[in-house]
Image (cartoon, grey):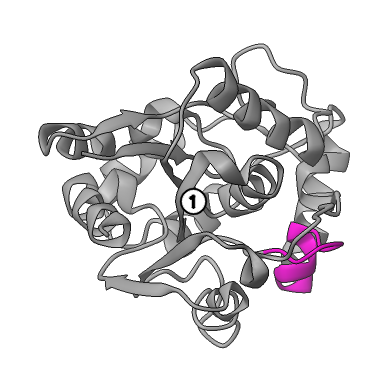
Amino acid sequence: MATYVLVHGAWHTGAELEPTASPIRAAGHEVHTPTIAGNRPGDVKTTGLKEAIQSIVDYLTEKNLKDVILLGHSYGGMVITGVADQVPERIRRLIYWNAFVPNNGESLNDMVPAPYVALFDAVAAQRGDGSVVLPFPIWREAFINDADLAAAQKAYDILNPHPLKTFSDKISLKTNPADMQIAKSYINCTEDTSLPHHYPWHPRLSQKLGLFRLVQVPGSHELCFSNPKRLAQAIMDAGRD
């Protein structure tokens, strides 16, 4: 049986991945759902990408986790790439679930449409604490378009403000993902419109992995809310030997 570490995306915590973790545990696997620095209760919203990455490195080290299947969702792709670059000896496979795939010197903002960057900057300037939140209409139509309104609102209500600096910081890597000697998978939710389909997650970002396994599954960017059981199966398909 395998050890999975599921790393959430922006505005989330590890708790939101617990409904996905449960079926994976029921299949006999060990599953961890840590929360990235900057998204934990009480964290300052000036946290940068380096600190975010280090928090997951520290989690793996403190729990002495090895032979890990490390998944990152969305922004979590930035984090798991940095983790794999620092402690490749602990990683068995990387899984990117509709996630950003950075090369050395790239930021998350470099991989999203310019209007998103402008929106994030404007929201953060208005909030004044270094954080950014998603307007509900964007969440509803682009992120969780496969759920009913009540489910979309319930999920939105538990999101937390996200540190903008983690979007603008450029990652520092010794090795780009395509050159990492680690197995890789990409899960692509086919109805995900959080990035427009003319500027897609797959293959635009997935191709930066070099050799990888592709798992496609119906659903939105937030399948962890709308169908966690189906997401769990996709993760196990992506993580199998």
Q: Position of residue 50 (x, y in %)?
A: 80, 37
Q: Position of residue 224 (x, y in %)?
A: 32, 46
In magenta, the rendered stretch is 102-114
**Relative to 74, residue 101 above or below:** below
Q: Is residue 222 visible?
A: yes
Q: Residue beneath label 1, please?
A: 73
Q: Residue at x 80, y 29 (%)?
A: 47
Q: Tell me which corner region of the image, top left, top right, bottom left or bottom right, holds residue 40.
A: top right
Describe residue 105's horizontal placement relative to residue 212 as left or right: right
Q: Amino acid at mark 1?
A: His
Q: Position of residue 6 (x, y in %)?
A: 42, 39
Q: Which residue occupies the foreground of this view, 154 or 50?
A: 50
Q: Is residue 151 magenta?
A: no
Q: Residue at x 31, y 71 (%)?
A: 215
Describe residue 203's horizontal placement relative to residue 110 as left or right: left
Q: Residue at x 59, y 75 (%)?
A: 205
**Relative to 190, residue 37 above or below:** above
Quarter of the figure that contains the N terminus: top left
Q: Is residue 98 visible?
A: no
> Callout 1: few (<14), some (14-19), or many (20+) C-alpha neighbours within 10 Å?
many
Q: Residue at x 84, y 33 (%)?
A: 130
Q: Which residue occupies the foreground of this view, 86 or 40?
A: 86
